[in-house]
Amino acid sequence: MPFPDDVLTEEEEVVLHLRPHAKAAVPPALALLFSLAVTIVAWVMLPDNNGGLIGVCVVGALALFIALTKGVAPLVVWRCTHYVFTDERVLTQEGVLTRERRDVPLARVNDHVVRQSLWDRMFGCGTMTVDSIGDTALVLKSVPRVQELQTTLYELIEEDHLREDEEDDELSDAPPAPAPPAQKAARRSLPRR
């Protein structure tokens, strides 16, 4: 499922759009294969009588339950998880039927930490925690190329700070705006000393 562009502002540009690393799909795929293998073994090994048929049905029902809960559902959630980095903020979106979308403006990012286990390092992925001022941390799990992503996030934060500084300079160089008529009238009505 693609990330909806209507979530972004008109001037906002997507720098990176990522999903969790494919290694997150390995356990669900193994659960599907295990469920299929157990069902086939039960079908081959159990006798061809009524008891064997009931046994195959019970094993098949359990295998189907495991396949749906441990295989299909995590694969769909993995496919519907988005990590989006724009020139203004970091967005995450998770969920299939009910969605949770969080965003952290780059100006509010306080710290970003990368954690990699040995398993993660073998696959070139890791977990990134983005701490923001006043909010709970944003945790991005199984992020591919997490080292490069940390560098990119740092560059985005620096560009955002430079852009804010330029906007502040432009505002301070601009001539003061004339006071609205209501304020001018209020100034005239003050008693003079």
Image (cartoon, rainbow, N blue to C red):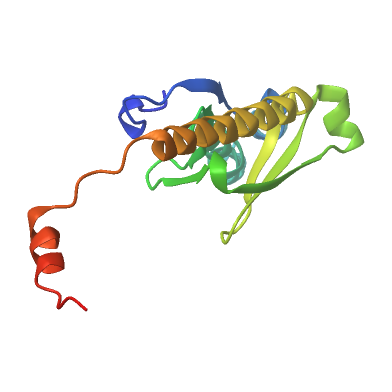
Q: Which residue appears farthest toward the front when viewing the image?
A: 193
Residue 49's x, y, as percent? 59, 38
Residue at position x 74%, y 39% from top? Answer: 127
| Residue 41 visible in the picture | no
Residue at position x 36%, y 28% from top? Answer: 4
Q: Is residue 108 left or right of residue 4?
A: right
Vertical order, 32 against 191 (above or below): above
Q: Is residue 132 left or right of residue 120?
A: left
Q: Is residue 50 left or right of residue 171?
A: right
Vertical order, 190 against 46 (above or below): below
Residue 148's x, y, as percent? 75, 22
| Residue 166 visible in the picture | yes
Vertical order, 26 against 187 (above or below): above
Residue at position x 13%, y 52% from top? Answer: 180
Quadrant for the N terminus in the image? top left
Quadrant for the C terminus in the image? bottom left
In this rendered view, identify the residue nearer to me: 183 or 9: 183
Residue at position x 30%, y 29% from top? Answer: 6
Residue 24's x, y, as percent? 68, 32
Q: Which residue appears farthest toward the right when viewing the image?
A: 118
Q: Is residue 10 left or right of residue 80?
A: left
In this rendered view, identify the residue nearer to me: 112 or 159: 159
Residue 86's x, y, as percent? 50, 28
Q: Quadrant of residue 186?
A: bottom left
